[in-house]
Image (cartoon, rainbow, N blue to C red):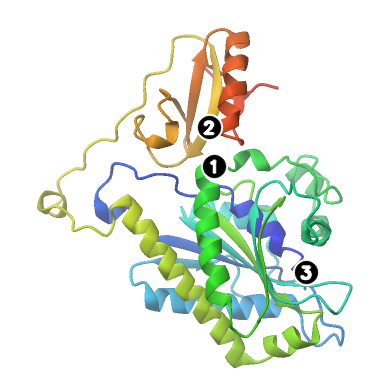
């Protein structure tokens, strides 16, 4: 579980946010990356009797899940961040792997652990701020995040790679700015389906869905979720996880959850509709609708979305604002509330942030966009 929440959240940062103007066969959820938590020199959580390691369970479940998703969803490409028990993959490379595959979703698989034997059950974690400190689960989640982020210390030159991220400070929000409202909504939808599908399975108790701070997802560019599939520290959960048939049943339920989510997603972008004859014949697709051209010179505004997909400037997501688009080789950054005056842009930002909690102020010039503190 140590990498669980950590990995799951990091990857939860960037999901498909809206339907691009592309042929139906190019839309839809086509690629998923599954991340078996831990591996190699990082065993993850270990059972009290030392006979069972988290890294072996996550790999077995992930392999089964990959096979079942492929069987239920012909045409979907499924990749694993590691396929062997002895392989150690740094957290940052897991995210880069998913981004390199142009994944539409990232699933990080983990097994939970506690210093106490009573906690049990499964949970789903997304990238986001843990704000409700009054909940009984808050302290437990912070312990989980701290353990998961601690995996960084096993990596060489981690202080340079993660640019000052402190594994002992789970309250750090250094990665949260990559999480847009749209990504969160997609990730939450997936999490809700998983939560229902796992109910009544080998791991009986649901601990619900949580938003937490994880380092692994910060460079990923798709929606993501981290799954904690039981407690290795709980005797009942451990017994269930040591049964090969139960692992297969867990993987089956997860594959069915993914399939249900994919169906809803494909319907939302029109990928379930027949491809027009012209497009099927190979005609070039229409160019995506472009956002308004950026203002000349330097200007300021509020970035509300970063996605690899081209967005229609009239999309309801922008709530009537006219977005400016700043493109990079990997992302399209959408900015609203634009002004050449920083003071005016700040005032507008204060209003926009009420509707887009994850938005932030940026400066745009010939070199691109930079965040304004």
Q: Residue at x 54, y 42 (%)?
A: 181
| Disc 1 element | helix
Separation of disc 1 and disc 3 at Cα? 33 Å
**Residue at the right extreme of this rendering:** 115
Q: Does the image show residue 222? A: no
Q: Mark 1: give few (<14), some (14-19) or many (20+) Cα within 10 Å.
A: many
Q: Nearer the viewer, residue 189 or 332?
A: 189
- Location of the N terminus by quadrant is bottom right
Viewer-nearest of discs 1 and 3: 1
Q: Residue at x 68, y 62 (%)?
A: 89
Q: Earlier in the sequence, mark 3 or mark 2?
A: 3
Name the residue beneath numbered marker 2: 304
Residue 150 x %, y %: 82, 57
Name the residue beneath numbered marker 3: 42
Q: Mark 3: give few (<14), some (14-19) or many (20+) Cα within 10 Å.
A: many
Viewer-nearest of discs 3 and 2: 2
Q: Does the image show residue 170? A: yes
Q: Is residue 334 left or right of residue 313?
A: right
| Disc 3 element | loop
Q: Is residue 261 left or right of residue 57?
A: left
Separation of disc 3 and disc 2 at Cα? 37 Å
Q: Relative to 295, is 264 above or below?
A: below
**Residue at the front extreme of this rendering:** 134
Q: Nearer the viewer, residue 271 or 99?
A: 271
Name the residue beneath numbered marker 1: 181
């Amino acid at each position: 579980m140590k990498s669980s929440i950590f990995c799951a959240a990091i990857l939860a940062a960037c999901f498909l946010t809206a339907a691009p103007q592309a042929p139906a066969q190019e839309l839809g959820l086509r690629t998923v990356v599954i991340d078996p938590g831990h591996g190699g020199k990082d065993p993850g959580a270990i059972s009290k009797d030392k006979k069972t390691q988290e890294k072996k369970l996550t790999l077995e479940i992930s392999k089964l899940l990959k096979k079942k998703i492929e069987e239920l969803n012909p045409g979907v490409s499924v990749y694993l961040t590691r396929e062997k028990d002895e392989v150690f993959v740094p957290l940052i490379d897991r995210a880069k792997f998913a981004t390199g595959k142009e994944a539409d979703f990232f699933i990080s698989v983990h097994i939970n652990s506690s210093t106490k034997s009573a906690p049990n059950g499964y949970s789903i974690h997304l990238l986001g701020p843990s704000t409700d400190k009054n909940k009984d689960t808050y302290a437990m989640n912070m312990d989980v995040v701290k353990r998961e982020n601690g995996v960084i210390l096993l990596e060489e030159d981690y202080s340079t790679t993660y640019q000052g991220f402190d594994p002992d400070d789970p309250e750090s929000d250094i990665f949260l700015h990559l999480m847009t409202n749209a990504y969160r909504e997609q990730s939450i939808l997936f999490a809700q389906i998983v939560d229902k599908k796992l109910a009544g399975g080998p791991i009986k108790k649901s601990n619900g869905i949580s938003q937490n701070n994880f380092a692994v997802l910060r460079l990923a560019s798709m929606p993501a979720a981290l799954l904690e599939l039981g407690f290795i520290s709980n005797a009942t959960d451990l017994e269930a996880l040591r049964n090969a048939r139960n692992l297969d049943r867990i993987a089956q339920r997860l594959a069915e959850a993914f399939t249900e989510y994919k169906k809803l997603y494909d319907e939302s972008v029109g990928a379930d509709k027949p491809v027009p004859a012209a497009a099927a014949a190979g005609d070039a697709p229409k160019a995506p609708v472009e956002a308004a051209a950026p203002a000349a010179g330097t200007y300021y505004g509020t970035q509300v979305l970063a996605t690899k997909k081209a967005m229609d400037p009239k999309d309801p997501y922008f709530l009537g604002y006219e977005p400016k688009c700043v493109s990079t080789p990997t992302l399209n950054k959408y900015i609203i509330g634009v002004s050449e005056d920083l003071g005016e842009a700040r005032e507008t930002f204060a209003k926009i942030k009420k509707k887009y909690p994850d938005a932030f102020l940026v400066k745009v010039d010939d070199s691109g966009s930079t965040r304004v503190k």
